[in-house]
Amino acid sequence: MSKSYFAVSARTAIGLARSGNEDSALTSSSLLAVADGMGGHAGGEVASQIAIKTLSSMVPVLTAPDIDTDSIEDLLLNSLHTIDSEISRVASDEIELRGMGTTLTALLIRDGRAALLHVGDSRCYRLRGNTFEQLTHDHTVLQELLDSGTISMSEAQDHPQRSMLTQVLMGEGSIAPVLMVYEVNSKDRFLLCSDGLSSVLTEKEIKSLLKKSNRDEAVEALVEATYVNGAPDNVTVVVADVIETEEHTVELIGAAQ
């Protein structure tokens, strides 16, 4: 496939236990991103907004026809340092924002491949036919305990460190991001989400709802399912199908609006 784009549907919701939405998201025909902010006094909203607006400003150069693959990957990785530095600058100017931070999971499609950039515990999944796969690996204490075999999956369900992050953009300059590149197929469907979805629904439940043929219906069903299960956190869902014609302009949702 020489040209490939995203057809996108997305929704964000506050949930049933939060007073504001600290999630932000970016959708476009070439770049998707979800950022889940954290920090009191609106800090989470500001941090996720910084991440998404920084990426949004980069869409023209990331999609320029004359840029090579290595340069694209360098730009994506460097964007994290730009975001981290801006979070540090804003937090140093406004004391009530100190300690704010954000996750970031972004997916860029170009020339039949998808570059996945990841920090934190927001997730990217791929549905290819009947095969459903989590492409990201959570940067959490819990995931490290699972990886080392210290705890079992059943023990992980109610673990006290379930949400403790090991990687996050919070202006400290100590991030170790992950960048992976995948070949895409014309029938691929991708899901980017905050942990307001993935910590509430099982993988089986997510797969079942994501398989709905209508993309808008899949998004609505996923969000509504979190509400049925108590929606304890903000929830953001971005569902994208791989297509061969460009049809979606850049849109910001959540705190980044």
Image (spheres, rainbow, N blue to C red):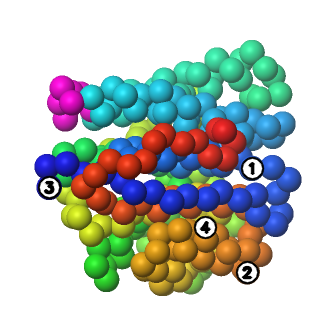
Q: Residue 126: image x %, image y %?
A: 36, 67
- For disc 2, the marked residue is 228
> Which label is found at residue 1?
3
- Above or below: residue 253 compared with residue 236: above
Pointer 1: what residue?
Answer: 21
Question: Residue 190 occupies which quadrant of the picture?
Answer: bottom left
Q: Are marks 4 and 3 in contact (CB under 8 Å)?
A: no
The part of the chain drawn in magenta is 65-72
Cβ–Cβ below 8 Å for labels 4 and 1? no
Disc 2 to disc 4, C-alpha distance:
12 Å
Q: Quarter of the image containing the N terminus? A: bottom left
Q: Quadrant of the C terminus?
A: top right
Residue 222's x, y, as percent?
59, 73
Query: In this image, 211 relative to 70: left or right?
Result: right
Q: Image point 33% across, 26% down: which residue?
A: 61
> Which numbered disc, 4 or 3, marks the residue closer to the eye?
3
* Residue 32 seen in this snapshot: yes
Query: Residue 76 occupies which quadrant of the picture?
Result: top left
First in residue order: circle 4 vs circle 1: 1
Q: Earlier in the sequence, mark 2 or mark 1?
A: 1
- Say which element carries label 4: helix
